[in-house]
Amino acid sequence: MKKSDPDKTCEQKFSVPFHDLDPMKVMWHGNYFKYFDITRDALFRKLGVDLYQVYRDTQYIFPIIRTSIKHVFPLRFRDEFICRAVLKAVDYKITVAFEIRMAEDNRVSARGKSEQAAIKIPEMETMLRIPDEIRESLGF
């Protein structure tokens, strides 16, 4: 990595709260995306990009257009875990890869990915490329 390249990773530590559990006493599968989202936002903030402020300044929104997740090992009440986000690509979409690992033994709990597009509003026009200012701020 060149010295001028920003670190395109971010890690956040969490503990599974009771309200995230399903009836089988493991974290409900949909809640993993919540932690992906929190960590993705922290990654963008680390890189100096506030997508809400971008929207206010430019009228571009960046909706999630695709997600995927592979569940490997279930999280349970009060398990401490690390969610890691890695910015993979910023070209015609923003691609972020995620991994959730147990804090105690580094065992993988889940892996996933998200993709975001740039949409110009109010026209709701899908842009064919992420705006240059955003790409440059994200190190691409």
Image (cartoon, rainbow, N blue to C red):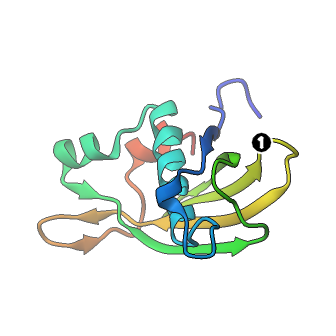
Viewed as shown, does residue 5 lie left or right of 130?
A: right
Work out whether residue 123 or residue 17 is closer to the camera in this orientation and state it: 17
Q: Is residue 78 above or below residue 36?
A: above
What residue is rendered at 61% in x and 44% in y? 15
Q: Is residue 12 above or below residue 16?
A: above
Work out whether residue 133 or residue 87 is closer to the camera in this orientation and state it: 87
- Which residue of the protein is positioned furthest toward the top in this rendering? 3
Crowd class of label 1 (few under 14; some 14 to 19; many from 20; radius 10 Å): some
Q: Is any atom of residue 92 visible in this view?
A: no
What residue is rendered at 62% in x and 68% in y? 25
Q: Position of residue 103 (x, y in %)?
A: 77, 42
Q: Position of residue 68 (x, y in %)?
A: 60, 75
Work out whether residue 54 or residue 29 is closer to the camera in this orientation and state it: 29
Q: Is any atom of residue 65 visible in this view?
A: yes
Q: Position of residue 98 (x, y in %)?
A: 66, 57
Label 1, secondary structure: give it: loop
Viewed as shown, does residue 57 lie left or right of 85?
A: left
What residue is rendered at 59% in x and 51% in y? 16
Q: Is residue 118 above or below residue 44?
A: below
Q: Position of residue 30 (x, y in %)?
A: 51, 71
Viewed as shown, does residue 6 lie left or right of 51?
A: right
Number of numbered discs on residues:
1
The image quadrant of residue 95 is bottom right
Residue that carries the numbered disc 1 in the rendered image = 103
Quadrant including the C terminus: top right
Work out whether residue 58 or residue 56 is closer to the camera in this orientation and state it: 56
Q: Amino acid at mark 1?
A: Ala
Quadrant including the N terminus: top right
